[in-house]
Amino acid sequence: MAVELDVFVGNTTIMDEEVYQLWLDGYTVNDAVKVRMEGGVMDECEASADVLQSDTMDQYRTFQMCERLLHSPAKLANQLLFQIPPHRQAMLIERYYAFDDAFVREVLGKKLSKGTKKDLDDIGAKTGVTLKSCRRQFDNFKRVFKVVEELKGPLVENIRHHFLLSDKLARDYAAIVFFANNRFETGKRKLQYLTFQDFAFCAGQLINSWTVGALDNQVEDMDVDLDKEFLQELKELKILISDKDLLDQHKSLVCTALRGKTKAFNEMEANFKNLSRGLVNIAAKLTNTKDVRDFFIDLVEKFIEPCRSDRWTAGDMRLYLTHYTNSAHILDTFKHQVVWDRYMGVIKSCIFKMYHD
Amino acid sequence: MPGKLKAKIVAGRHLPVMDRASDLTDAFVEVKFGNTTFKTDVCPKSLNPQWNSEWFKFEVDDEDLQDEPLQITVLDHDTYSANDAIGKVYIDIDPLLYSEAASVISGWFPIYDTIHGIRGEINILVKVELFNDLNRFRQSSCGVKFFCTTAIPRCYRAAMVHGFVEELVVNEDPEYQWIDRIRTPRASNEARQRLISLMSGELQRKIGLKVLEMGGNAVVGYLQCFDLEGESGLVVRAIGTACTLDKLSSGSAPNTNTHIHPNTAPASNACNSPSKDGKESPLAHGCRSTHNSPVHSACSSQRLSQNFSVSVPTLIFTGMGSGGSAGKEAGPLKTLLRQQTQTALEQREFPFFTLTSFPAGFLVHVGGVVSARSVKLLDRIHNPDEPETRDAWWEEIRQEIKSHAKALGCHAVVGYSESTSICEEVCILSASGTAAILNPRYMREGCLDIGSTDHRFEEPSPPSCGFCHIPYDEFNMPFPAQLTYCYHCRRQKVPDVLFTTIDLPPEASVTGKGCLIQARLCRLKKKAQGEVNATAISNLLPFMEYELHTQLMNKLKLRSMNALFCLHIQISVGENMLLGLASATGVYLTALPAPGGIQIAGKTPGDLSNEHHILTIQKRINDTIAKNKELYQINPPELTEETVGSPIPEPRQRHRLLRSHSESSDELSELDLSHGKKDAFVLEIDDTDALEDIHSLLTDASPPTGFYSCNTEIMPGIFNWTSGVQMFTSVRVLRLSNANLTNQGLNKTFTDLCENLLKSFYFKLRSMIPCCLCHLKFTVAVPEEELIQVTVTAVAMTFDKDQSQEKLTEKPTTKGSTETEEQLQFPLELSTDLSTNMQTSNKISGTVSLLTPAAKLYQNQLIMVHSAGVPESTTVSPRAASVDYGSFADRCSTWLELLKMKAHTIRRGSVKTISSLDRSSPLPEGRSRSLRSNRSFGGSSVPVVKMTPVSFLPGTRIIKYLGIINMFFIRETTSLREEGGISGFLHSFIAEVFAMVRAHVAALGGNAVVSYSMKECVLMENPNKNQAQCLINVSGDAVICVRETDQEPPSVANIGQTCCSSADGAT
């Protein structure tokens, strides 16, 4: 006596958010039923395991049928097959495009290629995310990447418009696209302490200030590619470390300003030249794609780690970088104020964000 | 050229990729009507083509306009090979053919392919220009409106109800033509879809012609069905009720319910307007006493016609109880009355009405459920133009129904429906309805004048109970029943149990809430062929009916209820079994006596263990009854209290002279007596059958807290509906394992299947609590030898738990007297109005019936209204409700005896009984629901279209009916696994069907479908070949509805007040 067929179709498509989440998380029907049973939903309506099984199956089918539409969310709003109230549509889309920070952290900066896709089972095993869910997330990244790659206009806006995502999620996707495009290295051991949100914040900073679009918002790939001219100009900053006078002058200005304001003053003073060299060298090397990829690792190695070993507090860091940046303006012979600001503005906020345990 | 059809193809979107190389499509469109075809340009390389075509014009006969669908085919242009079809859209242009409805069809339609399903959408504009031509022999019936709704549609008034219309057309099924061997499945499916579309168009046109002949302008309760007879052909048949409808001006629309009647509806007998007897009576009386010989002679029910047709006697009775108490009123006067009413109806061949709910005053009494089944062997339909055989079959069945109704002392059948079940070459034709006495005036022209004659003799019976009063003569009852005086008005006799196929009349007074009651049954039969098979089936049918009715009766008693509404019994035939499923909504009618309990008895009293066993069962049953009473809030008022509380019937005193027998003392003793002996309903449990019965009784789970369920339009006892609506269709197919192919095992399996379905619904819809599953319609089928398929369509509607109280308090305060005055402008119709009021207010009393004291109080007030009415206007005529059928019963008695004997032979000594009484429901019931906005979410680019099997949407008011939706789709797949198996296949198909219905409604400018039903869902699969095919037929009424504003309450509240205020005045 087997149930050969069992369907339930509502005029308004019925979707249970809990089951949707289980589906997104890649649970099989049977596992999902178990989870639901443990969740106590059975008591709600005197349901039995059969009822739960049947309901879960139905919903899974519905989601599978919807999945095609979710790939281009704009279609969801004007398709005729499912009558779904707009707020539910928004929920469906938002959750479908949501991702696990643990998973994205693994993929961040990697090429969104078939090769990476093959590694998904390892990543899944490592992060505890089911393979099915990994695939969905990975495919989402890829899909968004592909769509926005060829579009003009602001990245975040494009993502939000094309995929009908919330602002927050659109920004996260922008970060993912940006990282994937520039292939920033994020997987090194030294970077492991950084969360996806740290990187996403940095990406936002970079997008806002260092890309082509920061100046001109009608260029293709404006928010994805770094502004080549700017990178070229960054070489000019070298003078800050190559010119001995300038370096000393800079140091004394900073030290004057910092004296007595922090416990770590001595370490700052001692390390000033090293730290300044580190930052300026990073700037000067950014014309090389390879060095762009290593941007974050460089920041950590050349700046954050030395500071951390000197036990700077976050306040110290803030103080130091503020004065370090501002003092450069007082240097008479330093002519590259604009570039300096554009560079240091981003560096400052990135380091602030990244300077934690 | 009487018509010009114009179509314009605007654009497409989401088209499938047809050219793999470019990932694009070069689409163009063919627009075809009749034999004319136009083409658009090719829109190259686009999945979202913009054609913006010119207007394609077709000049056609209006006959074609009615029959033919506009056929739109989207194709992919291919330079070197044949163009590939992407899909089609069929547009029924009928809604454009009558002036009030839609004027243009415009919108996005899903492009449908029978193999691939929906493939993108196309935007189309369609218009029709009709030219008048009055003098040709009419073959078309443009302008006749069709409604699926089985009540007078809400923004119309019934000027006249003409009666039954039916038609059938037959053809060869393209699937079985020789050419099918060589054409593609797609071509075959499309041929079939197109043929059925043509046939339904033709059918509708022919019915329209009949309606015009009768002088009507509309068909309500239009029910169209397909019989896929396989080799022997394809039958499309339809029945309906022809009416003359007047559109209500928009202003009055909201009040439909109350205003419909004044002119037309003569106060029915059901209304007890008190006064006026003196005046009119002498004249009227006797003036119409003429014919009472029925036009059609009653025919015997068992007709073993020739070899292959067997009809099964299925007169159904109620009342298992002991012989009825001696009733007394009767008398010759009633007879006269009844003769009059009869004449109007008897001029008709079939006094049948497909309506299940009626204008106030239309339905007078209800006799019981009548049904007839007949087993036929199908043979090839040789000449499609002469569908006589099928016609004759149905004619036979209808005659039978008619004679059953007569046996019950009734001249009409309401809530009438027909169905078939086909397996190979055997076909069971079934018809059922509710025998009833109707107020004849709706059916006669020029009857609006006083005509109060008839009613003088009757005692007033309030509408809340009038329909329960027996229509037959109590001395010659058609079946054993236990009669008592009505618990509501105490003047007329009522049966102890009432079964009907109609909806609960809104004015009926009900105690507590109702609930869905189902009887389920499987019977194995041997596989056989031809006549042997047909005979075997027809031999089984009576047993099945008997058992289903016993189950229903038991379950009814277990829930402590005394009446069933919307009883629908389906018997489905398979190769090796018959399935029976009876669904109904049980209620406790205040007017009927409280049901007795169920008593268990064993035949071997000596056996101690057995005795113990019996005691345990008995206890469980008693507990269940007690629990159910609580659950459904059935606390009927104590008898004594009610006697005291019931109004001193002033009118009654007045009538006393005319009535020979109604001494009040009599009544009281009568009541007591019956009350005393009403308990025994004995179940003996020594045979397995009974054990099974008890088992099935006790395994039915009641719905979880917060849920109610019913198969009527709305749940009796709930009035404050809110706007939450969720229509759904669910299909389950069970494969039986060979192991438990015993009747008992099957019954259990089948019962579990139905129960589990209900449980699933409750669970899925739990977020809507508190809510009620309304209009639950179960359909069973045996698609293959070991498969049982159950299809359910229903709607979940939310309600507000707390509002019943509010309603009560609100009522008295709202504006009151104006309404009364208005009504007084039509003195002649006052009584009608009053009756309407009564009904409405009863509805209100129903609302609060859980608060027993209040309700009672209210009822008292109502009655006072009537007495108060007397002094005010003498013109009011008393229209008495009950009619007596004495002589008629005499005539029928011989026939009845015959029947009874038959019933006995069916199963030794067992009396099968069901009865039903029913009553008409007044119209569009103005329920006092709460109005809450229904507005669906704005912002989305696809308009929201609500669907419901019920005839209204809570919280909204229907302002326009846009036409009937009647669609037939076939879907086939050769990649079943890839589409998610059979469940995935059907799931997406049903979703597609919904989508296409919504799109058509939206294109007509509508935002809802009411009275939606899925009439056919035939599924065939062949998993080994990875194939499946499914046919679905759906129908409904496309409407525009608007949010109910504060205007609405008047219909209910005002009247409430009117009543109250006049009551106040009286006191």
Image (spheres, coloured by chain):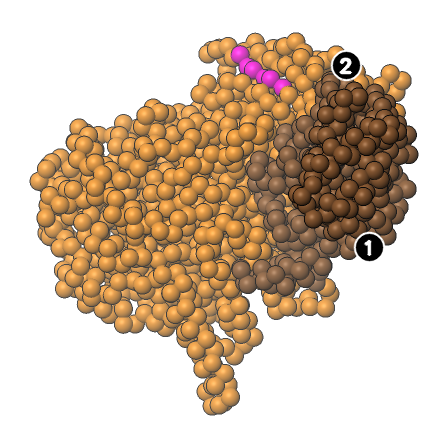
Label ID, residue B542: none
Residue A73 lies left or right of residue B719; in this view the side is right
Measured from the top left, where is residue B482 in percent x and y? 32, 64
> Residue at 63% across / 63% down in the picture?
A38
Q: Quadrant of residue B564?
A: bottom left
Task: Please give the count of numbered marks on the rendered protein.
Answer: 2
**SS for callout 2:** loop
Q: Which residues are magenta?
A: B124-129
Q: Residue at x 90, y 30 (%)?
A: A288
The residue identified by callout 1 is A126
Residue B42 numbered mark, or none: 2
Quarter of the rendering containing residue B74: top right
Q: Main secondary structure of the magenta part?
A: strand
B757 lies left or right of B272: right
User: Residue B587: image x %, image y %?
Assistant: 38, 57
> What chain letter is assigned to the residue under label 1?
A
Chain designation of label 2: B
Q: For marks 2 and 1, give the CA distance.
A: 53 Å
What percent of the width, then of the height, locates residue B203? Answer: 56, 29
Q: Residues within 10 Å of mark 2 (few under 14, many from 20)?
A: some
Q: Are marks 2 and 1 on the same chain?
A: no
Residue drawn at x 46%, y 51% as measured from the top left: B771
Q: Which chain is orange?
A: B
Question: Quick check: B7 above or below B983?
Answer: above
Image position, residue B52 (x, y; %): 67, 12
Say what amino acid the circle numbered 1 marks: Lys
